[in-house]
Image (tube, rainbow, N blue to C red):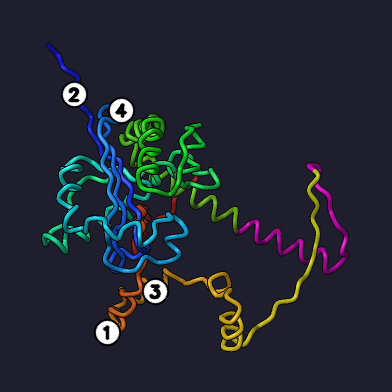
Amino acid sequence: MCTEKQDIKIVLDIETTGLDYKREKIIEFAAVKLVNNTITEEFETLVNPKQEIRSSSISIHHITPDMVEDAPTIEEVMPKILDFIQDYPIIGHNVIFDYSFINRACEELYGKGVQNHRIDTYQMYKEVFPDDPSHGLESLMNRFKIDFPLHHRAMADAKGLAYVYPHLKIFHDKKRNWQLSQLGNIEYLLERYLRIQQAIQMLQAEMADIKSIFKVHFEESGREIKATTGEMLVSYSRPSYNYDSERIKEIIDSTGFHERAFKLNSGFIERLINDSSTDSEMRNQLMSCRTRISESKSVSIQKPEKTPAYSTEE
């Protein structure tokens, strides 16, 4: 008798005292077991973090200190969590966030982390529908018209994701299968990519030249030009100013608009951390300022010392 092979995955979500997995703690864990895309088991628990819950986090998940006061500690509940997730693949929306907290707790308790394969529905969603204005869980559920209330609580979000995951996977698998079918043409695709890249660079240079002519046109006559499609070529100017940075910081800090006015250059900070000339004390101080973690994958083209000329002919 032939029995259907079971496809088992764990869909999980956590709520925490804050965003930094190195300093903050889990205060709620919830997970459901998906067997062939059907929820068969559920597990959820509040967790006493034995530390303060940030007010910014409470405003999101509404879990207050009195709600976790009598809850089990992570030491007490982690064996149950590990027993539930076992070695099954874990699914989460920005799963690196959930994984980082669980992994950190395991390292602190047992000296080793978890090895479960991770499936990130946030990345899947971005790959399949890159033009959607938002890629949050609520947007994902709206995309597939899944009517399930989300409350920023762990079980509600885990169940919501479990309901929408099979629908997302169908689209993701279709794209993945098409991508796999193209691997036999990988050398041609690289050449094609480089030709497209070269064409874009040439077009960008041409656009810059044309735009410079537009500027001269307005300097000479100032006449607006209307295209056959209705778009208007117009000229405008606006002043720009330099500011006393120290005085601006004082004023902004006093008004509470600091986060809106100043955006941290994370890329520059990462380069500082990885720079061999950065002393170890500063590197450690910078690394200690890391908060929320996310994960992205990308590819890049490395040019040889002498770049060959690429023909534009197919």
Amino acid residing under circle 1: Glu
Q: Is residue 39 magenta?
A: no
Main SS of the magenta segment?
A: helix
Q: Secondary structure at mark 2?
A: loop
Residue 171 at x, y = what percent?
41, 31
Task: Kindly indicate whether the residue at mark 1 contacts the one at mark 4 (C-beta within 8 angstroms).
Answer: no
Marker disc for residue 38:
4
Labels 2 and 3: the sequence-earlier one: 2
Range of residues picked out in magenta: 205-229
Residue nearer the viewer, 89 or 57: 57
| Image quarter of residue 273 | bottom left
Q: CA distance from mark 2 to mark 3?
A: 48 Å
Amino acid residing under circle 2: Lys
| Image quarter of residue 276 | bottom left
Q: CA distance from mark 2 to mark 4?
A: 14 Å
Q: Nearer the viewer, mark 4 or mark 1?
A: 4
Report if residue 254 is visible in the image.
yes
Labels 2 and 4: the sequence-earlier one: 2
According to the image, label 1 marks what residue? 281
Labels 3 and 1: the sequence-earlier one: 3
Task: Kindly indicate whether the residue at mark 4 contacts the one at mark 2 (C-beta within 8 angstroms).
Answer: no
According to the image, label 2 marks what residue? 5
Q: CA distance from mark 4 to mark 1?
A: 51 Å
Q: Secondary structure at mark 4?
A: strand
Amino acid residing under circle 3: Ile
Residue nearer the viewer, 44 or 98: 44
According to the image, label 3 marks what residue? 269
Q: Nearer the viewer, mark 2 or mark 4?
A: 4
Labels 3 and 4: the sequence-earlier one: 4
Q: Nearer the viewer, mark 2 or mark 3?
A: 2
Q: Is residue 209 left or right of residue 216?
A: left
Q: Secondary structure at mark 1?
A: helix
